Image: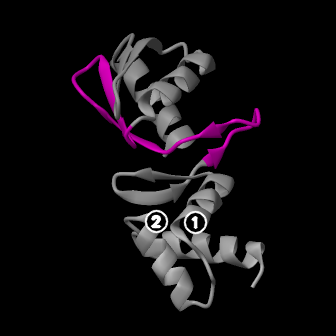
């Protein structure tokens, strides 16, 4: 079977059900007739732009400027804060992306490992920023 077939199958599998590890993915691919190792699955996931968020593999979202935006979820935290959650190690990259978008509603951002804190100007700004962030990263 060809690489494109394998890639299509990987995308189908991660969309259909949670896949928690590369070993699990490799095992399922072998059951479907693909000869793979964990290392080849790792390369495939990288080529496909697949990341692990919340213990599940998901495909990253291409941005209009050619970059990649990882998936994240956002919720309000009081009237002037938004908290984002993402895969471990991605918060800084997502925060840099948010800052580069220069939302007028956002006063500042802080990134941890898998958590993003976003300060906004007002409750109205919070609603607008939350909608925009969810559209871009959710």
Give the spatial CA distance, label 1 vs label 2.
6 Å
User: Which of 5/1 is in front?
Assistant: 1
10 above or below 137? below
SS category of the residue bearing label 1? helix
Q: Earlier in the sequence, mark 1 or mark 2?
A: 2
User: Which of 4/61 is in front?
Assistant: 4
Q: Are marks 1 and 2 in contact (CB under 8 Å)?
A: yes
Which residue in the protein does label 2 denote?
22
> Magenta span has 85?
yes
Percent of width and height locating residue 15: 51, 70
User: Which of 113/98 is in front?
Assistant: 113
Residue shown at the point (75%, 73%) measured from the top left: 3
Residue shown at the point (41%, 15%) measured from the top left: 109
Quarter of image, res 86 = top left
Residue shown at the point (42%, 30%) measured from the top left: 91
Labels in figure, total? 2
Left-right relation of 62 to 73? right
Residue shown at the point (40%, 65%) measured from the top left: 21
Quarter of the image with the N terminus in it: bottom right
Which residue in the protein does label 1 denote?
41
> Magenta span has 15?
no
Percent of width and height locating residue 61: 62, 47
61 above or below 92? below
SS category of the residue bearing label 2? helix
Which residue of the protein is positioned furthest toward the left in this rendering? 78
Instruction: Give the extent of the magenta segment.
Output: 61-88
133 above or below 36? above
- Neighbour class for label 1 at 10 Å: few (<14), some, many (≥20)? some
User: Which of 99/123 is in front?
Assistant: 99
- Neighbour class for label 2 at 10 Å: few (<14), some, many (≥20)? some
């Amino acid at each position: 079977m060809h690489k494109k077939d394998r890639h299509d199958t990987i995308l189908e599998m991660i969309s259909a059900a949670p896949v928690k590890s590369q070993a699990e993915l490799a095992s399922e691919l072998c059951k479907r007739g693909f000869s793979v190792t964990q290392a080849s699955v790792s390369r495939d996931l990288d080529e496909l732009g697949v990341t692990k968020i919340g213990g599940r593999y998901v495909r990253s979202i291409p941005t209009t400027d050619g970059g990649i935006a990882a998936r994240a979820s956002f919720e309000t935290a009081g009237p002037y804060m938004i908290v984002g959650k993402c895969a471990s190690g991605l918060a800084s990259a997502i925060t840099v992306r948010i800052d580069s978008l220069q939302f007028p509603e956002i006063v500042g951002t802080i990134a941890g490992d898998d958590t993003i804190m976003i300060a906004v100007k007002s409750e109205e700004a919070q609603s607008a920023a939350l909608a925009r962030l969810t559209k871009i990263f959710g």
